Amino acid sequence: MRKAAAWIVLVACGTPGCDDGGTVPCTMEGCDSFCRSQGLAGGACLENGSCSCTGDWDGGADGDGSPDEGGAGDADADADADADADADADADADADADSGDPLEPFRQQCVDAINRYRATEGKAPYARWREAETCTDGEARSDSETGTAHGAFGSCGEWAQNECPGWGSLEDTVTGCLAMMWAEGPGEPFSAHGHYINMSSTSYSRVSCGFYTTPGGSVWAIQNFQ
């Protein structure tokens, strides 16, 4: 069983769905409905405006890392994404070795995975926002230390953010977590579809993927959009 945690997005003002306070408001009804749609026990709004889910997520009955409900994150799409991610990692292996950044393969896989999902809708790819990656790593670390998803939101100049807190491995965050987010699909309320909206938006042009592995081995991953 994989531990579920809060990863509802906060969106900076000036983007679709914003209120005057600069974030998409979390509502108890929307948060609880979203968490239950993911097969969890329920959810509640935190003081920082994020939604916290309770319960365990088992990766879905089909075992493909997506929720049981269909949508864009179906088994074929996940299989294609995994195969392409492996090919991309192999092609970039030499460059990764020279970069000195052990997270390089996962950063590129993260960007590539998001862009593959966007391509299924004919959307232009996001550019990789390299200069924000170290800062995004820092946000992931800060959130892991406070135990609050989106606790450091905005410190890297991002306009929107998705987060995968407390996952089992780096690989899980760029496969299972992104698949769950995309599988939310379009629709209302924003609290139930926000991750998909950020991943598919035409309001942003680039994405930065950051990661932090805690001393206990859990992984916090953030995708910042601008």
Image (tube, helix red, strand yellow):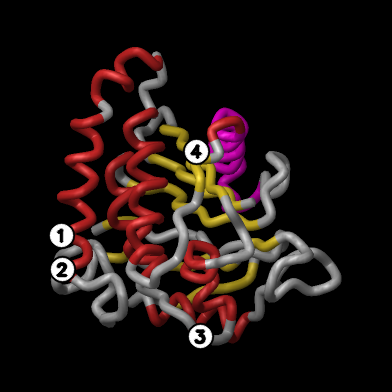
Highlighted magenta segment, given as a residue range: 132-151
**Residue 95 to residue 147: above or below:** above
Residue contact at pointers 1 and 2, CB within 8 angstroms: yes
Q: Is residue 38 above or below residue 135?
A: below
Closer to the camera in the image, 201 or 11:
201
* Amino acid type, callout 4: Gly
The disc placed on residue 79 is: 1
Residue assigned mark 4 = 210
Does the segment drawn in magenta span residue 150?
yes
Q: Main secondary structure of the magenta part?
A: helix
Which element carries disc 3, helix, strand or loop? loop
- The dot on residue 76 is 2
Front of the two marks 2 and 4: 2
Alpha carbons under labels 3 and 2: distance apart: 23 Å
Q: Position of residue 213 (x, y in %)?
A: 41, 33
Quarter occupied by residue 72: bottom left
Circle 3: residue type: Gly
Helix, strand or loop at label 1? It is helix
Q: Give the secondary structure at mark 4.
A: strand
User: Which x, y percent locates residue 8?
Assistant: 55, 65
The residue identified by callout 3 is: 187
User: Looking at the image, how many numbered discs can be counted on the residues?
Assistant: 4
